[in-house]
Image (tube, helix red, strand yellow):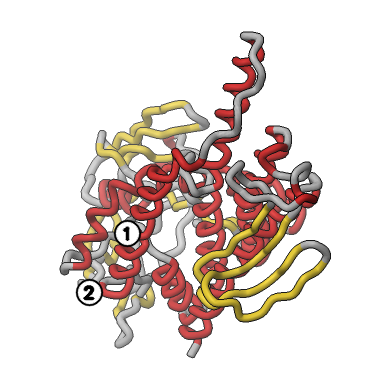
Amino acid sequence: MMFTVGVILFALGIGISIAIHEYGHLAMAKAFGMKVRRYYIGFGPRIFSFKRGETEYGLKAIPAGGFCDIAGMTALDELEPDEHDRAMYKQATWKRLLVMLGGPISHAIIALALVFVLAVGWGLPRLAADAVVGQTTCVPATQAPVERGADGLLTGGELAECSGVGPAEAAGVRAGDVIVAVNGVETETFSDVVQEVQPATTSVALTLDRAGERIEITVPVERVQRYVVQSPVDDPREATVGAIGVTSAPNVTEYGVLAAVPATFGFMGDLTVQTWEALLRFPERLPAVARSIVGEDRDPDTPISVVGASRLGGEVADMGLWEVFILLLAVLNLFVGLFNLLPLLPLDGGHMAVTIYEAIRNRLRRLMGKPNGPPVDYTKLMPVTFVVMVIGAGIMLLTITADIVNPITFR
C-alpha cells in the first residue's frame, strides 16, 4: 500500500515541479511587462482551462511536461496588435535571459527548500565517499557474539569496555582526518580502512588528508578478538584481527533551524557539483542502460526515467525512508534545472544561447558602425532542434524500457 502511495506522491512531486518551472517563466515575463498568452500543465487534449486577465491557464491530458506561451518568444511568432511592443524577442537581453532562467531557478529553489526540510527534519548525509575519522578511542580487546537472525539481519556485537588512549590517538590521528590510504592502498570508504587494518600484525602506515594537507603517520596495531563477515551472505565468525582505535564520522549530521540555513547552502553547493559531473557522464552511461534491457545487471549509476524515479520513491516510502524520498526529489529537481541550462534547443539553455549570440553579434556590429542585425532565424535552427528532440525521445524511451524491464532498486 505504501509503495503505491509513494509512487503517486513522487509523481505528484514531479508534476508540481513542472508547474513551478513554467510558473517561473510566467512570473519573470509578467514582471517585465511581456504578455503571457497561455500557461498549461501537460500536453494533448485539454481537460479544463480558465482565463484570468490576459492569460489562459489550463490542464491537459498527457502529464509529460508543460508550457508557457509568451508572445514573441521568437521572431517567427505571429503577433496581435497589442503584442508588438511587448514581444519577448524585442526586449533587452538581460530581461530575455532572466525569463528563460525562471524555470531552472525555480528548480534550484525547490531543491533548496527540500534540502532545508531534510536538514531540519532528519539531518544531511555526507556526500563524499571518504573515510573520515569520527573519534579516536581506546581499543576493546573483545566483542560479544554477532548472530544472524531469521530475517537475515545481524544482532549483538557489543564491544567490551576499555580505557586509556588508543594507538591512533597516541600516534597523532585526529577526529576529522580523512584516511586516504593504508600502507599505500587507497581507501575510499571506512570499510576499506577496516579491510586493510585487520590483517596487519605490527603497524600500519596511514596517509591522512588534514584540512587539505597530506600527512603520513605510522600507527601501531593491537591484535583483538572480533566477529567478522567476509560477505553480506556469510555468517559472522570469530577471528583475531588488527585494530587501531578509530571510528567513522556519522553519515548524517543533524541541524537546528538556524544552523540548517548555511548547512543547506553548503550541501547544495556540493550536490550541484556532483549532479553536474553526473550530467557530463550521462551520454557514456547510456550503453549500459541498453545492455541492461537485454539481461545485463543494471548499474545503479546509470540514468533513470521519471518512471524509475517514481518507482524508487515508492520503494523508499514503503521502507519508511522519507528522508531518502525528499533527497531523491531534491536531486531530481537539481538535475532537471541543470539539464535545462544546456545550450541546446528547445531547452531553456538553447534559447539563452541564441539570445547571447544576438547580443554579442549586435555589439560587434555597433563597434563597426553598423545597425543591429535581425533576430536569429529559427527556421535555420529547426534541423538541429529536431535532431535534439529525436535523441531526447529516444533516451526517454530507452530509460523507461530499462526501468520497466530491469529497474534500479533499493531493496
Whichever of callouts 1 and 2 sits on the residue coming sooner in the sequence is 2
Structural distance between the alpha carbons of marks 1 and 2: 46 Å
Residue 171 visible in the snapshot: yes
Q: Position of residue 40 (x, y in %)?
A: 63, 67
Single out the residue that lies furthest toward the left.
Answer: 295
* Nearer to me, 92 or 187: 92
Q: Residue furthest front?
A: 81
Q: Is residue 271 left or right of residue 158?
A: right
Where is residue 82? Give x, y as percent.
80, 50
The residue tagged 1 is 394
**Looking at the image, which is closer to me, 229 or 347?**
347
The residue sitting at 46% across, 63% down in the picture is 161
In-image side of 333 versus 187 (left or right):
right
Task: Report if residue 254 is visible in the image.
Answer: no
Relative horizontal placement of residue 396, taking residue 367 as reference (left or right): left
Q: Amino acid at mark 2?
A: Asp
Specify few, some or many for label 1: CA neighbours under 10 Å numbering under 14, 14-19, or 20 or more: few
- Considering every residue shown, the one lying at the far bottom of the view is 1
- The residue under label 2 is 235
Mark 1 or mark 2, which is nearer to you?
Answer: 1
